[in-house]
Amino acid sequence: SAYVSMQGVGHRYDPRPGAPMAVQDIDLDIHRHEFVAVVGPSGCGKSTLLRMVSGLLIPSHGEVSVFNRRVTEPRDDVGIVFQKANLLPWLTVRKNVLFPLKHKYGHYTQEDEKRTDELLKMAGLTQFADKMPDELSGGMQQRVGIVRALLLNPDILLMDEPFSALDALTREQIGFDLLKIWEENPKTVLFITHSISEAVLLSDRILVMSKRPGTVLDLIEVDLPRP
Ligand code: ADP
Ligand code: ADP
């Protein structure tokens, strides 16, 4: 059965009658550990869709549920990766990755540190673990942001154009590394991208949204063999 389910979902940021809907008539089922890429023109509601899954935004119409429970508040089992990693400049890479755990529980364990080093290794970051963020390229910083989100072991990972600031070659390399990481850390992923090739490389399905009136146009199965 569906893991994330949206039924008749629509949202209007402006409550005044007659104000436009940001998204509408969305019916969508996502299975556990499915990787769904979300594409569509700027302003079509991709970020709005992600915010509704995270519970940061409760839609004005319809219902979003995760694991058969209606989403009514921000979920703490959702990891989010944005366009910029926003690493803390005064902490090393390893400490940045551990920071949310420390913030959430007040401390972290040796086991957490071990897992951090494993994830850093998978992301090709071992030799940067003790460096400061400003010693890393943008691509490396984004990898750190993804590792940081994965360390909390979220069930759902939401990524809002995580690679849009990177050059094509770096994006491709990160894409291949991510595939390896997903193999060992399966997650339910919603991934906003402007790059069709990235969507095809990484995802199981591609959700195509239209600008007007902010609806789902298509949900395409990606059936290409992965490298
Ligand atoms: P993107 O197109 O990359 O999703 P935008 O530049 O449209 O980003 O939006 C950036 C931020 O501004 C988002 O947090 C979004 O919620 C907010 N925003 C976008 N449109 C409006 C609006 N009409 N009124 C208020 N906030 C908005
Ligand atoms: P996308 O991520 O596809 O660029 P968004 O979800 O950011 O699209 O925006 C969808 C629509 O909702 C746009 O018309 C945008 O201006 C509007 N919008 C987004 N965030 C806000 C906000 N916080 N307040 C008002 N309008 C918003």
Image (tube, rainbow, N blue to C red):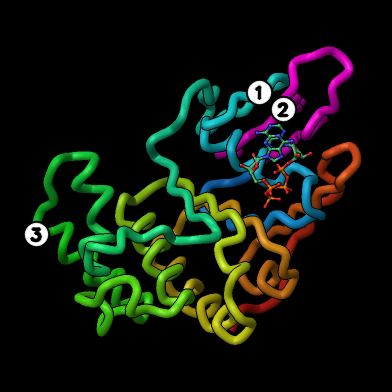
How far apart marks 3 and 1 lie (CA) works out to 41 Å
Query: Is residue 43 left or right of 110 when viewed as pictured?
Result: right
Instruction: Assess whether mark 1 and mark 3 are in contact (beta carbons under 8 angstroms).
Output: no
Q: Relative to 182, does residue 37 appear above or below in the rendering?
A: above
Mark 3, other Cα within 10 Å: few <14 / some 14–19 / many ≥20: few
For numbered disc 1, what is the local secondary structure?
A: strand
Q: Residue furthest left?
A: 110
Q: Which residue is mark 2?
A: 7
Q: Earlier in the sequence, mark 3 or mark 1?
A: 1
Residue 42 visible at all:
yes
How far apart marks 1 and 2 lie (CA) works out to 5 Å
Numbered mark located on residue 179 in the image? none
For numbered disc 2, what is the local secondary structure?
A: strand
Query: Residue at image x 60%, y 38%?
Result: 2
Query: Is residue 175 left or right of 47 when viewed as pictured?
Result: left
Q: Which residue is mark 1?
A: 63
Residue type at mark 1: give it: Glu
Tell me, yes or no, whether the highlighted magenta stretch contains residue 4. yes
Query: Residue at image x 44%, y 59%?
Result: 186
> Residue 141 location, x and y as percent?
41, 70
Q: Which quadrant of the view contains residue 27?
A: top right
Q: Which residue is mark 3?
A: 110
Q: Relative to 17, does residue 210 appear above or below in the rendering?
A: below
Instruction: Assess whether mark 2 and mark 1 are in contact (beta carbons under 8 angstroms).
Output: yes
Tell me, yes or no, whether the highlighted magenta stretch contains residue 219. no
Q: Residue furthest top?
A: 17
Magenta-tinted stretch: 1-29
